[in-house]
Amino acid sequence: MPAAASTPHAAPTGPMISVIGLVKSFGAKQVLNGIDLAVGRGESLVLVGGSGAGKSVFIKHLIGLIQPDEGHVVVDGVDLTLAPPETVLALRKRFGMSFQEGALFDSKTVFDNIAFPILRHRTRDRGQVAARVRECLELVRLPGIEDKMPSELSGGMRRRVGFARAIALEPEILLFDEPTTGLDPINTAAIGNVINQLRSELGVTAVTITHDMNLARRIADRIAMMRRGRILSIDTPDLFQRSDNWFVRAFLDGEVPEEDRP
């Protein structure tokens, strides 16, 4: 298996995100079961785990889209679970979110997709918006495609346009939800390189959900394994790969533990 890329990462200087005792249920189903986790400033944390482990629900708590039943989410010193709605809304603008498969507006050009959050949240003239769109496309290695429609793009290009839109408002924290699902190994490697480049050039904190261990090793400072709403294991990519935790080993080997079989 390929080793993690030797991309230089800034050393975390303190938690940008602190999650304390996070619990969430939907009806009788408990999805998060007491999560404690800290993400350092400038760190890249990757969450892995099987379907239904609670990863997507967890990441929605980080931007205040879901309120926990118990526990706290603290972002740069602000407790989202106690803050008034206007404070949560203002803090959310410091996040950039890249959804699965890019989630682009199919009826809009690449330019209009990336310009959308700028026009919605910032007061800028057309020239400033155009300059920012070009800058974002250059950062994701797709210069000159402003006039293309999403239907004209490959899957990997659509993901990168989604990244460009996520960084349009110059966020401090980037969230990536399954950024390589359905992509071939070459495009997966390209996505990993772009994520590392964004981190290096923008100095952002990143949290990524993925099932792709090749991507995880490429972009992570730490990898956290989620299972049944808990953080089962968390470590650097090298130590995670050598973990003796039985569930981590089963996940890495592509096996389904007996107690999780239907």
Image: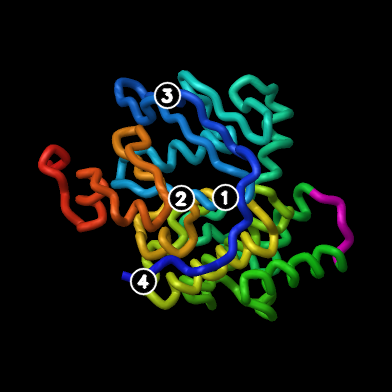
Q: On residue 2, which mark appears?
A: 4
**Label 4 element class:** loop
User: Could you say where residue 180 lies in the image, as x and y percent from the top left?
Assistant: 43, 63
Horizontal side of 113 relative to 7 (left or right) equals: right
Q: Are marks 1 and 4 in contact (CB under 8 Å)?
A: no
Q: Residue at x 40, y 25 (%)?
A: 34
Q: Observer-nearest residue: 220 or 49?
A: 220
**Label 3 element class:** strand
Gap between marks 1 and 3, in whole Å?
24 Å
The magenta segment: 122-126
User: Could you say where residue 249 lies in the image, as x and y percent from the top left?
Assistant: 22, 51
Residue 128, by quadrant, is bottom right
For label 3, count other residues whose C-alpha is less than 10 Å away and answer few (under 14), some (14-19) or many (20+). many
Instruction: Name the amino acid type tagged 3.
Output: Val
Viewer-side label of 1, 3: 1
User: Could you say where residue 123 lies in the image, as x and y percent from the top left?
Assistant: 86, 51
Q: Residue at x 71, y 58 (%)?
A: 168
For label 4, count other residues whose C-alpha is less than 10 Å away and answer few (under 14), some (14-19) or many (20+). few
Viewer-side label of 4, 3: 4
